[in-house]
Image (cartoon, grey):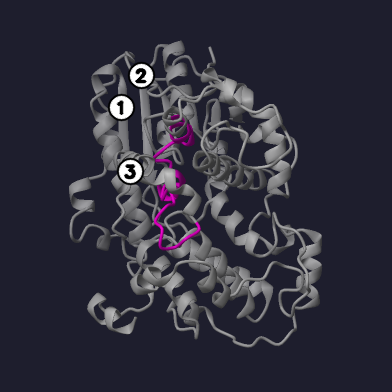
């Protein structure tokens, strides 16, 4: 039956498939989309094999750490897109049920109630935040076979049998092993619901829909909708819109106008980055779709892959330099984070850092700090450093930080905190509270790179940093174009007042 690669399928509950179940249940928790979704594809395969309807449950709870208007709105906008895309399929035997928990714990029992009626349960395999524990606990209550499907990256997480601690080594391994996963049959179907025709299930039982009614998007996305939910209302939504439709527009703009300039992505004033990470994090777009679209622009074929496996970036794919750089970020640097998180439960703890990092940080833990700031001072952008304050303001306002500025942002938090452990706590708190792409393996890679993960010892040995790579705002301002960046984020004053400052 399976067309989803075996490496992507993991059994969470090894019980028989129930032949008398009413439907196949797909619990959508990480890959919140219709297109290029291995989990949905697997659920459709089961539904066709068993000749059952398919029920797709997409829910959002209120009691998760950092729950806020910003994160909730982005998720709910994605659910609204899915309701539009999937609601038309009811006559084809597909029922989509979006549920937004109105109060803490109101959604408890929903999955279990649906699973009792299901023949088999499929869900998403995401190695970060509270999702691994949530699915583990849920599996104990599911009375049928339950599978979790890995659709995180081009490389299945279980394809590598070790944790990679350097991007160079991971890239060299990819150059030797990635090719089979680039074959068309290794990619997900672009639309697993195309031409699907399953036995009819007009609606869910009243005992489900009355207790756990479908989300009212007009109300939730209205002026006061989020205000009724028990979440953090101080972290307000950004101008970015969640969902697959918005993700498609962002991808198209990037491919049309910025991919050719991707080599300038480290310049804050260049606006050359992809900007796709929020939609990737919430599963509104697939890495397979992004790679497929980018490579199509280059008229790429497998014959263009280099035979070299030396771990060097820049000349393996056989495409333009800009596209080579983008694919290295999209696959090497993004997926090394999934490799680490999927193999190390302590991925967000300081003890997961390399031994040399722990030693050098311990050696310099009591070094005098030239400046010390509290979490509140960092959060409110009230340090002495104008460039650092600008990066923090961007995070608070836009839910992201320019990638190069994020490195400086973290290095200064290390320098201005009472200890490396406190610096790590502050970085995780600020990033996960405000960043749309936080709470993700890739964002943890960025935070821990600041502290030395995926890096090497640097000389000379410095106070506070020891042998960890050092960065300064002065050098950054000299090296990069930041004038417009500072104009945009250098003050909380209105734009007219900012023009007078610079």
Q: Is residue 186 visible?
A: yes
**Residue at the disc numbered 1:** 95
Q: Where is residue 202 in the image (x, y as percent from the top left)?
A: 24, 22
Task: State if disc 2 and disc 3 touch (CB < 8 Å).
Answer: no
Q: Position of residue 465 (x, y in %)?
A: 71, 74
**Residue at the disc numbered 3:** 253
> Would you say 201 lies left or right of 180 here?
left
**Does label 3 or label 2 sit earlier along the sequence?**
2
Residue at 69%, 54% (x, y): give it.
454
Q: Is residue 211 visible?
A: no
**Residue at the disc numbered 2:** 53
**Does label 1 or label 3 sit earlier along the sequence?**
1
Task: State if disc 1 and disc 2 touch (CB < 8 Å).
Answer: yes
Residue at 33%, 78% (x, y): give it.
492
Q: Residues within 10 Å of mark 1 (few under 14, many from 20)?
A: many
Q: Determine the CA span between mark 1 and mark 3.
A: 33 Å
């Amino acid at each position: 039956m399976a067309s989803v690669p075996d490496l992507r399928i993991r059994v969470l509950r090894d019980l028989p498939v129930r032949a008398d179940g009413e439907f196949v249940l797909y619990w959508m928790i990480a890959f919140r989309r219709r297109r290029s979704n291995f989990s949905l594809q697997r659920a459709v395969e089961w539904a066709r094999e068993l000749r059952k309807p398919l029920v797709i449950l997409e829910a959002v709870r209120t009691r998760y750490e950092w729950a806020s208007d910003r994160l909730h709105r982005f998720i709910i906008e994605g659910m609204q897109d899915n309701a539009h895309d999937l609601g038309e399929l009811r006559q084809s035997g597909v029922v989509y049920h979006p549920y937004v928990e109105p109060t803490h714990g109101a959604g408890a029992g929903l999955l279990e109630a649906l699973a009792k009626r299901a023949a088999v349960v499929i869900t998403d395999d995401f190695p970060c935040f509270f999702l691994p524990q949530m699915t583990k606990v849920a599996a104990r209550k599911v009375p049928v076979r339950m599978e979790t499907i890995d659709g995180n990256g081009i490389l299945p997480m279980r394809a590598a049998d070790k944790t990679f601690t350097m991007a160079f080594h991971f890239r060299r391994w990819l150059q030797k092993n990635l090719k089979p996963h680039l074959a068309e049959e290794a990619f997900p179907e672009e639309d697993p619901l195309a031409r699907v025709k399953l036995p009819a299930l007009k609606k869910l039982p009243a005992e489900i829909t009355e207790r756990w009614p479908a989300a009212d998007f007009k109300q939730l996305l209205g002026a006061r909708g989020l205000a009724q939910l028990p979440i953090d209302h101080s972290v307000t939504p950004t101008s970015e819109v969640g969902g697959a439709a918005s993700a498609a527009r962002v991808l198209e703009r990037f491919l049309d106008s910025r991919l050719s300039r991707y080599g300038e992505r480290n310049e804050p004033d260049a606006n050359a980055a992809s900007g796709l990470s929020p939609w990737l994090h919430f599963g509104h777009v697939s890495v397979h779709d992004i790679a497929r679209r980018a490579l199509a622009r280059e008229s790429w074929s497998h014959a263009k892959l280099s035979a070299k496996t030396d771990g060097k970036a820049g000349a393996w794919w056989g495409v333009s330099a800009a596209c080579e750089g983008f694919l290295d970020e999209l696959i090497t640097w993004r997926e090394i984070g999934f490799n680490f998180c999927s193999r190390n439960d302590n991925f967000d703890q300081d003890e997961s850092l390399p031994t040399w990092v722990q030693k050098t940080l311990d050696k310099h833990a009591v070094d005098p700090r030239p400046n010390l700031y509290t979490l509140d001072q960092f959060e409110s952008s009230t340090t002495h450093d104008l460039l650092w304050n600008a990066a923090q303001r961007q995070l608070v306002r836009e839910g992201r930080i320019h990638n190069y500025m994020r490195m400086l942002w973290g290095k200064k938090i290390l320098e201005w905190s009472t200890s490396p452990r406190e610096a790590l706590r502050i970085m995780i708190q600020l990033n996960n509270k405000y960043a749309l792409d936080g709470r993700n393996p890739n964002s943890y890679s960025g935070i821990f790179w600041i502290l030395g993960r995926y890096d090497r010892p640097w000389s000379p040995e410095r106070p506070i940093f020891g042998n960890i790579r050092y960065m300064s705002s002065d050098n950054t301002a000299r090296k990069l174009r930041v004038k417009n960046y500072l104009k945009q984020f250098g003050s909380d004053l209105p734009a007219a007042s900012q023009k007078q400052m610079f």
